[in-house]
Image: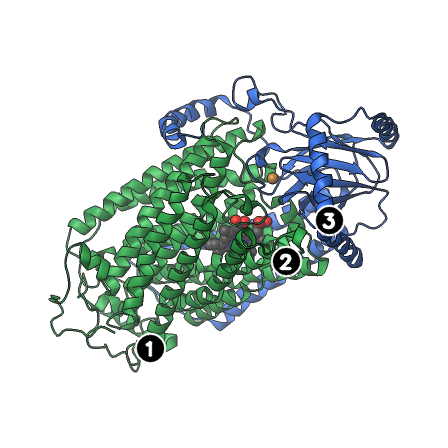
Chain colours: A blue, B green
Amino acid sequence: MKDNPIKHSLRYSLLGGLIALFSLDVSADIQPYNMTEGVTQISKEVFDLHMLIFYICCVIGIIVFGAMIVSLIRDRKSKGVPPADFHESVLLEFVWTAIPFAILIGIAIPAAKVLIDMEDVSDSEMTVKVTGYQWLWHYDYIDHDVDFYSVLKTSRNEIYNRSEKNENYLLEVDNELVLPTNRKVRILITSNDVIHAWWVPDLAVKKDAIPGYINQAWTEIDEPGIYRGQCAELCGRDHGFMPIVVRALPPEEFDAWVLQQSNKTVAGSQGSSISLQQSNKTVADSQGSNASLQQENKNIEQNALIN
Amino acid sequence: MSTTTADEHHDDHHPSGIMRWITTTNHKDIGTLYLWFSFIMFFIGGFMALIIRTELFEPGMQFVDPQFFNSMTTMHAIVMIFGVVMPAFTGLANWLIPLMIGATDMALPRMNNWSFWILPFAFAMMLSTLFMDGGGPAGGWTLYPPLVLQTGDAFPFVIFAIHFMGMSSIMGAINVVATILNMRAPGMTLMKMPLFVWTWLITAYLLIAVMPVLAGGVTMLLTDKFFETSFFNAAGGGDPVLFQHIFWFFGHPEVYILILPSFGVISSIIPTFARKPLFGYSSMVYATASIAFLSFIVWAHHMFTVGMPLAGELFFMLATMLIAVPTGVKVFNWVCTMWRGAMTFETPMLFAIAFIILFTIGGFSGLMLAITPADFQYHDTYFVVAHFHYVLVPGSIFAIIAAVYYWLPKWTGHMYSEFWGKTHFWLSTIFVNITFFPMHFVGLAGMPRRIPDYALQFSDYNQIATIGAFGFGFAQIIFLGLVIATIRGGVKATDRVWEGAEGLEWTLSSPPPYHSFTTPPNVKGEWNWFTHQHYETVKTRS
Ligand code: HEM
Ligand SMILES: [Cu+2]
Ligand SMILES: [Cu+2]
C-alpha cells in the first residue's frame, strides 16, 4: 500500500471524479447535516446555544451581505452616477462597534451558564475511568469490580474493501461501555501513551485523554439506547479506528449487568489476549514511574479544588 | 543600503543569469523570488491535499496507508502555512512596501537575500523526510507531544526545517519594520501610509514576537527526544499540555499573521474599483492594532477540551468573542467603501468581493467556535476544518491572488487577460465552496478531523468535497498559465493601470525602474490619497 501512494492517487483521481458524478446521482438520501440534539440535558442546552449563535450569524449575514448586494447592483460605474466622496463617520464606527459588542454579551451569558453546569461534576452517583491507548479504550468502573478493553470490531476486510461495509462501519466495538440512564455518571479520562480525546456527540462530552492528567466530565443520559462516538485527537496511525460505543440501559438493567460482569471478572474469564498484553504493559509502566502517579494525584487534587 | 546609480534603466554592476537571482539584493527580484517560491509550494501543498481528498472520496482505505495519510495532512498544513501564505505575503511586502512609501529599496538588502534563500533549503529538508525511515512527520502541524516524539528519523530534520522557516520569517519581519520606520518619503506620516503598509508593520511585530516562541517550543521537543529532558513528559515530571500553551501562544497570533496583510490588500483594491476613498481609514488602523493585541490573549481557545479550570475557559471564551468586534469593523468599513461608489468588476475586484463574503462566513464559524460549550462539539471535527479553510483559502489565498492580479500589470508592464482572469475567478469561487461548505455539515454530523477513513453516513458530503477540491486545483493551472503569459507579453500597461488607483506605486512607470525611487517623492502638506488626492482625480474625470 504504502510504497507508491502518489502514483496510485494520480491514477485514481480522474477516475474518482467521474465516479463521483454518477454516485451523487444515485445517493438520493442526503445524510444528517446538523449537530445532534443528543440525549442529555446538557447536550440539548449545547444544541440550543449552537442554534442561537447560528441564527445570530444568519441575521448579521443577511444585513451585511444584503447591504453589499444592494450596493453591488446599484453602485456601478456603468450606471453613470459619479462616486460619492464620504469616507468617515465616527458615529457609524461607534454604532458598529457597540452593537456587536452588546450582542456578544448577550450570547456570552447563556454560554457561561451552560459551561458552568458542564464543569460541575459534584453529586455524581458512580464513576467510570476511561483510559486511552494507541488504539483502543479501557473502561474501569471504579465503584464496582468491573473493567475491560474496548476495541474496534469492524473487520479488516470491510476496511480494505474486500467485503460489504455494515451500517455501523468503524463505529462498532467488541465491548461497549454500558451506562445507566437517569444517573449522574462521573467520567475520569486519562491516557497511557499519547493524547486522545473521548467524544460521544449525543452526550456532548468531549475531553482530552492526556498522560499524567486525569480529566473529569459527567453525563446523565435521559434515554436508553446506543450512542456512538470517536477519538477526537490525532493519536497516530489508527486514530481513525478507535471508536467509542455507549450502551445506555435503564438503571435496573444496568445494575443486573454490573453484577453479572463482576462475577465474570472474579471467575477470571474476561480478557482477550490483546487486553492481557496491554494490562501487563500498564502495570510495568506505572511501576516505572512514580512521578506520573504523583502527577495524577496532584491533578485530582487540582480538579477537586476547582469544583 | 545599496548605493543607487544615476542611470535607473541599466545595472552594469549586476551579474546576469542564475547568479543574478542568487546574489540579488534588489527588493523587486527578491519579491519575485518569494512569489514564485510560494507559487511552486502552492502546487506541492495542493497535490498533497488532493491525495488526502482522494483517500477520503469513499469510506474504506483505498489508496494510501493511514500513517502516510497523517503525514500528508501534517505536511500539507506546514507547506501551505510556512511555504505558501507567509512567503507570498513577504514577496508582496518586498515588491510593494518600497514602492508605496517612496523608498529606493528595502532597508536591509543583504539580509533580505539571506532570508529568502534559507527557505528553499528548509523546505527541501522538510520534504525529503517523506523518504526517510519511518516516513514524514505525521503528528499534525500542531506537533503535540507525546505523539510527535514517535516520529521516526524525520524528527530532527523537521525541527531544523521549522527553525529555518522561523529565522527566515523573523529576518523578513525585521526588514519590513526597519524599512517602514526609516525609509518613508518626506511627509509620509504614519497615518498617511497605505493600509497594506500598516497591516504589514503590525504583522511584522507579531512575527518578531511569536516566531521565537515556536522556536523555543520545538527546541524543547528536540531535547525531550534526544537529551533526556522532560519538559513535556509526564513520567519525568513534565507536562504535555505545556507544549500546547506554548504552541498556541505562537499559533493564534500566527493565524493573524496569515490574514492581516490580506486586510491590507483588500483595503487597497476596494477603493480603487469603487472609485471612492477607503471608508474609516483610521478605524481600520485601530482595528488592526486591536486584533493584533487581542490575538495574544486568546490562544487557549484551541484547547478548551484539555480540561482547563472553569475561570480559564470563561476568560478565553470572552476574549475570543471580543476579536469578532474589530474584525466586524473591517468588514463594515469595506462594505461602506463600496456604498455609493462607482464600481467596475475587474478580476482583482471580483476576488476582493469574494474575499469579503467568504472570509466573513469563516468569521461566523469562528464566532461559533468561540462559544466554549458548543466548541466541545465542534472541536477537532470537520467543522473546524471548514472554519479555517474559509478564512485561509477564500481569505488569505484569495487576497494574495487578488493582489497578484491588481499589481501584475505594474510589475510586468503588461495587462493580463481579463477573460482568463474572470474564468479563473469563477471556477475558483465555485469550487472553493463546493469543497469547503459541505465540511461544515459533516463536522456537525460528527466527523472528526485527521482521519483517513470514516463512517458511512459521511460519504455524500465527502464526495462533494473531493470533487470540489479537484476542480479548485485544476482552476489554479489557469492562473499559472495566465501569470506566465502576462510576464511574456500582452497589452502595454499604463503607469496608473487602474482608473481609480491611488498611491505612490502608480506614479512610477510600469514596470517600475530597477531601483524604485532614486529621489524620494515629496508627499508633504495636503497631499493625501485617501481624501483630497482622490477627490481631485474624480473631479478631473467627470
Ligand atoms: C472572527 C475571528 C475568529 C474567531 C473568533 C476564531 C476562532 C477560532 C477558534 C475558537 C478555533 C478553535 C477551534 C477548535 O479547534 O475547537 C479556531 C481554529 C482555527 N482558526 Fe480561527 N477564528 C477566527 C479567525 C481566524 C482567522 C482570520 C484565521 C486565519 C486566517 C483562523 C485560522 C484558524 C485555524 C488555522 C484554526 C485551526 C487550528 C488547528 O487546530 O489546526 N481563524 N478559530
Ligand atoms: Cu485518536
Ligand atoms: Cu485561534
The residue type indicated by label 2 comes to: Met
Q: Is residue B485 left or right of residue B320?
A: left
The residue type indicated by label 3 comes to: Ile
CA neighbours of label 2 inside 10 A, class few (<14), some (14 to 19), many (20+): many
Distance from Cα at disc 3 to Cα at disc 2 = 23 Å
Q: Mark 3 points at which residue?
A: A214
Residue B317: give its label. Answer: 2
CA neighbours of label 3 inside 10 A, class few (<14), some (14 to 19), many (20+): many
Mark 2 vs 1, N-terminal side: 1
Q: Where, quadrant-wise, is the C terminus of chain B in this rendering?
A: bottom left
Give whichever of B59, B26 is nearer the camera.
B26
Q: Mark 3 lies on which chain?
A: A
User: What kind of element bears circle 2?
Assistant: helix
Q: Which chain carries label 1?
A: B
The residue type indicated by label 1 comes to: Asn
Q: Residue at x 43, y 49 (%)?
A: B157
CA neighbours of label 1 inside 10 A, class few (<14), some (14 to 19), many (20+): few
Q: Residue at x 25, y 74 (%)?
A: B1
Distance from Cα at disc 1 to Cα at disc 3 = 53 Å
Please provide percent x and percent y for residue A294.
Answer: 75, 54
Q: Name the residue under label 1.
A: B182
Q: Mark 2 lies on which chain?
A: B
Please provide percent x and percent y for residue B316.
Answer: 63, 60
Vertical order, A21 against B106 (above or below):
above
The reply to whether discs 1 and 3 touch (Cβ–Cβ < 8 Å) is no
Q: Which residue is drawn at 58% across and 49% down?
A: B145
Are discs 3 and 2 both within one chain? no
Distance from Cα at disc 2 to Cα at disc 1 = 39 Å
Vertical order, B115 against B120 (above or below):
below
User: What kind of element bears circle 1?
Assistant: helix
